[in-house]
Image (cartoon, rainbow, N blue to C red):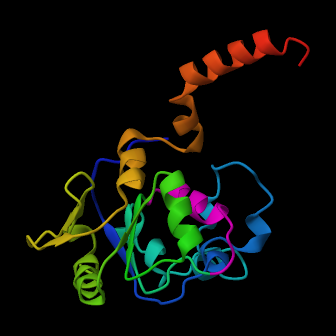
């Protein structure tokens, strides 16, 4: 998994509450078990019309937000089903950080396992970042995970909280498999002892 240390990028404003996982990646795209290829269908029903053409007014279809790496959203982001395809689609599109007043628990935890930093901030700070994001490509938001800060192009700095273990995993680029592989030597030792003690297994 790619490490997350610092990020400076364009932030896309999505001032909607209760954006659920079916809005993030509709159910018809859940057939794959690959983490790649879902970005094109991120927010599919809001991005495209019935003929598959882009809806110009949707934020991620606007020229200034096509390369957005940060998403500023409303309360209760990621609610609905527990589908891990939702963070897969977000990451595959190129978004590495989502900022909102609150997140659904399962979605929040799935983000960390897929290299995405979800940041919960008070509503007034999210509102300030939303205004910043509305400036488009003229404003870049900076995220510093080590310092746990979000900075605007105008110099405003907001501090955020993050679990120490989850922070460590993002900084080191460790998903569940990576965490297991950190213990590879201990696992090998255990298996060697087990093979000697129970050679019939």
Residue 102 position, x and y percent, is 43, 81
The residue most toward the left is: 155
Q: What residue appears at the point 46 percent right and 72 percent down from the top-left corner?
A: 60
Q: In which quarter of the image is residue 198?
A: top right
- Is 111 drawn above or below residue 35 in the view shown? below
Report if residue 177 is visible in the image: yes
Q: What residue appears at the point 59 percent right and 61 percent down from the top-left corner?
A: 89
Report if residue 68 is visible in the image: no
Tell me the quarter of the image containing the C terminus. Answer: top right
Q: What residue appears at the point 62 percent right and 79 percent down from the top-left corner?
A: 23
Q: Quadrant of residue 144?
A: bottom left
- Is 75 drawn above or below residue 154 in the view shown? below
Q: Which residue is nearer to you in this view: 74 or 37?
A: 74
Q: Which residue is nearer to you in this view: 50 or 19?
A: 19
- Is 190 drawn above or below residue 16 in the view shown? above
- Is 58 drawn above or below residue 168 in the view shown? below
What segment is highlighted magenta in the picture?
Answer: 80-95
Residue 141: say if magenta. no
Q: What residue appears at the point 78 percent right and 13 percent down from the top-left corner?
A: 197
How many numbered marks are there? 0
Residue 128 position, x and y percent, is 22, 84
Give the side of residue 178 with respect to residue 192, left or right: left
């Amino acid at each position: 998994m790619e490490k997350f240390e610092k990020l400076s990028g364009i932030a896309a404003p999505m001032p909607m509450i209760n954006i659920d996982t079916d809005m993030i990646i509709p159910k018809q795209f859940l057939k794959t078990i690959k983490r790649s290829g879902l970005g094109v269908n991120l927010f599919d029903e809001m991005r495209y019309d019935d003929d598959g053409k882009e809806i110009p007014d949707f934020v991620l279809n606007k020229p200034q937000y096509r390369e957005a790496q940060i998403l500023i959203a409303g309360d209760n982001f990621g609610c609905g089903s527990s589908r891990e395809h939702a963070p897969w689609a977000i990451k595959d599109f190129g978004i590495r950080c989502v900022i909102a007043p609150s997140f659904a628990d399962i979605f929040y935890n799935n983000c960390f396992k897929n290299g995405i930093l979800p940041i919960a901030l008070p509503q007034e700070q999210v509102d300030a970042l939303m205004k910043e994001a509305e400036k488009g490509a003229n404003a870049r938001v900076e995220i510093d995970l080590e310092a746990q800060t979000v900075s605007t192009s105008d110099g405003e700095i907001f501090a955020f909280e993050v679990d120490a273990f989850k922070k460590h995993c993002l900084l080191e680029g460790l998903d569940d498999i990576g965490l297991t592989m950190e213990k590879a030597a201990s696992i090998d030792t255990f298996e060697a002892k087990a093979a000697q003690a129970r050679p019939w297994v």
